[in-house]
Amino acid sequence: MEKNGERVIYYRDELNDEFSEAVIEPKFIGDDYDYKGGFLRALGRLFIYEFLAKPIAEIYLKAKYGHIIVNRECLNACKGKSIFLYGNHTNALADPLIPQFISLNPSVYFIVHKNNVSMPFLGALVPCLGGLPLPDTLKATKNLHRRIEELVTGKYPHTVTIYPEAHIWPYYTKIRPFTDASFGYPMTFDTPVYCFTNTYQKRMYRKTPRIVTYVDGPFYFDKEKPRKEAKAELRNAVYETMVKRSTENNVEIIKYIKADS
């Protein structure tokens, strides 16, 4: 693998270390947080998401990263259905943009860290872009669960995107271990699962690597097995697929080294 830079990051905990460069004081997502929003949010989503964010996102991804998607046709197996989409978390700007170009469904939502709705000005736009922040209270958890249920079991199909690694490791070229906690959603709502793996690949005349996104699925849980076992198997199937796809990385922008304890 080519070493395309000399930056080194030392880590201790693959599950919990965070290397996002943004310093944000997260807001409290309590009982009164409105996950659905009213008319103004719907209007904002129509104009900000459809007419502003998506065109700009497409231009940005193509111009900066020469972005391409591989195996998107596998989504045809669940065309017209809501899906859960799991991906690796390696790029603060590209990660929120790519799923909308993967999904066949016109409306894409994201389960996000509450930092995303805590930013000055931009934080207010995140819900219009489909951000669903992780809750801090039991009631807020129920409200999030209810909103996800509305999205995936409603009249129109939606895509709910989850980054199970939870924390951003910029340009990381492997797949970090993640828990099966978020895989309860597709089981509860009996919804197909897909995954995508963003890889960084060398370009002939550009220092910035190309992002090549590999899509895989669908994955289903085994209804004949106990929930705990089926959830672990679903997680493992997604994780192993992403690990296999990550071998397509051939440029290392940042080298990650595990620090001595």
Image: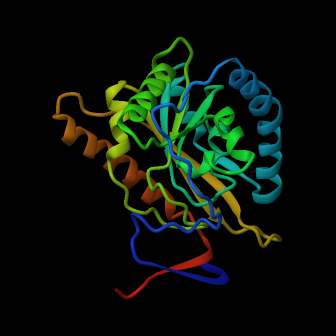
Please give left or right for residue 208 compared with residue 95 in the image.
right
Q: Looking at the picture, does residue 61 appear above or below residue 254?
A: above
Q: Quadrant of the C terminus?
A: bottom left
Residue 103 lies, in percent from the top left, at 61, 33
Residue farthest to the bottom? 260
Return the residue nearer the eye: 240 or 133: 133
Q: Is residue 192 visible?
A: no
**Residue at the (27%, 44%) spot, across then down:** 233
**Residue at the (52%, 34%) spot, across then down:** 160
**Residue at the (42%, 85%) spot, across then down:** 259
Please give left or right for residue 35 compared with residue 224 in the image.
right
Residue 157 lies, in percent from the top left, at 55, 20
Residue 152 lies, in percent from the top left, at 48, 23
Return the residue nearer the eye: 35 or 178: 35
Residue 206 lies, in percent from the top left, at 81, 70
> In the figure, residue 243 lies in which quadrant?
bottom left
> In the figure, residue 8 lies in which quadrant?
bottom right
Please give left or right for residue 113 compared with residue 211 in the image.
left
Residue farthest to the top? 155
**Residue at the (65%, 63%) spot, across then down:** 22
Q: Looking at the picture, does residue 78 appear above or below residue 137?
A: above
Q: Number of labelled discs?
A: 0
Describe the colour scheme in one phrase.
Answer: rainbow
Q: Quadrant of the N terminus?
A: bottom right
Q: Is residue 243 visible?
A: yes
Please give left or right for residue 88 compared with residue 126 in the image.
left
